[in-house]
Amino acid sequence: MILNIPNSLTLLRIALIPCLILIFYLSENTLSAYQKNLTATLIFLFAAITDWLDGYLARRLNQTSDFGAFIDPVADKLIVIAALILLVKLGRVESIIAFIIIAREFTISSLREWMAMNGESGSIAVAFVGKLKTTMQMIAILFLLYYENILFLPTALMGKILIYIAALLTIISMIYYLKIAFNMLKKKKGY
């Protein structure tokens, strides 16, 4: 079944992407800068929650599907890429940082596909470093979208620090996954 609850949540996450972007194209008469930041942060937070929730519900309700396995990571990557491009446009993230994160996503997705073609589809499982990277990246994006202090917490500064940490973890995790793939293929080819 393609349209079950988890897949519907995933498709909702994709549908939120234009909303996230278009908020910043509204005039200041429609939404103030603060309201734009807050609304974008809430949309991205809701999307992050649906990412966790769709996986949980798919397992809990036994509604896993091939379509869900395909579309869930696509939705995750699309909303992160959209947010990063938006943050570059707003001057809150350097383009090199966005490029590192986006390039890693394409590289690892292609690597997984290539490994599957070589009969090693389950060999590139998500590692702790990948989960840590994702966590840092999501928190950084939330802070950089909000970009306002919360009491005495400088979220803009914290977001910048976390996005640099996420970029570093991005490189480390990419090297980790490439090394695993290279070693598996080397072993398979008998080198």
Image (cartoon, rainbow, N blue to C red):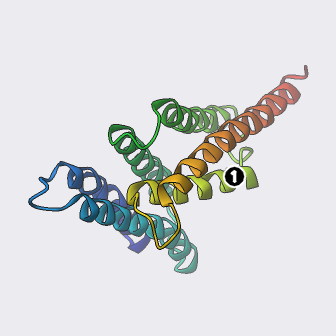
Quarter of the picture containing the C terminus is: top right
Residue 83 at x, y percent in the picture: 39, 48
Which residue is tagged 1?
A: 126
Residue 138 as seen in the image, left or right of residue 91: right
Please give the name of the residue rendered at 42% of the width and 53% of the height, measured from the top-left corner: 75
Residue 113 at x, y percent in the picture: 59, 36
155 relative to 180, above or below = below
Please give the name of the residue rendered at 50% of the width and 56% of the height, measured from the top-left corner: 66
Q: Quadrant of residue 10?
A: bottom left
Task: Determine the residue located farthest toward the front in the rendered image.
Answer: 152
Quarter of the picture containing the N terminus is: bottom left
Residue 59 as seen in the image, left or right of residue 30: right
57 relative to 16, above or below = below
Residue 119 as seen in the image, left or right of residue 30: right
Asked if residue 31 can be seen in this view, the reply is yes
For mark 1, give the secondary structure: loop
Residue 90 at x, y percent in the picture: 33, 42
Please give the name of the residue rendered at 37% of the width and 63% of the height, measured from the top-left corner: 41
Please give the name of the residue rendered at 29% of the width and 55% of the height, measured from the top-left corner: 20
The residue closer to the viewer here, 149 or 73, is 149
The residue closer to the viewer here, 66 or 60, is 60
115 relative to 56, above or below = above
The residue closer to the viewer here, 13 or 98, is 98
Q: Residues within 10 Å of mark 1 (few under 14, many from 20)?
A: few
Asked if residue 1 can be seen in this view, the reply is no
Task: Determine the residue located farthest toward the bottom in the rendered image.
Answer: 61
Q: Amino acid at mark 1?
A: Val
Task: Determine the residue located farthest toward the right in the rendered image.
Answer: 191
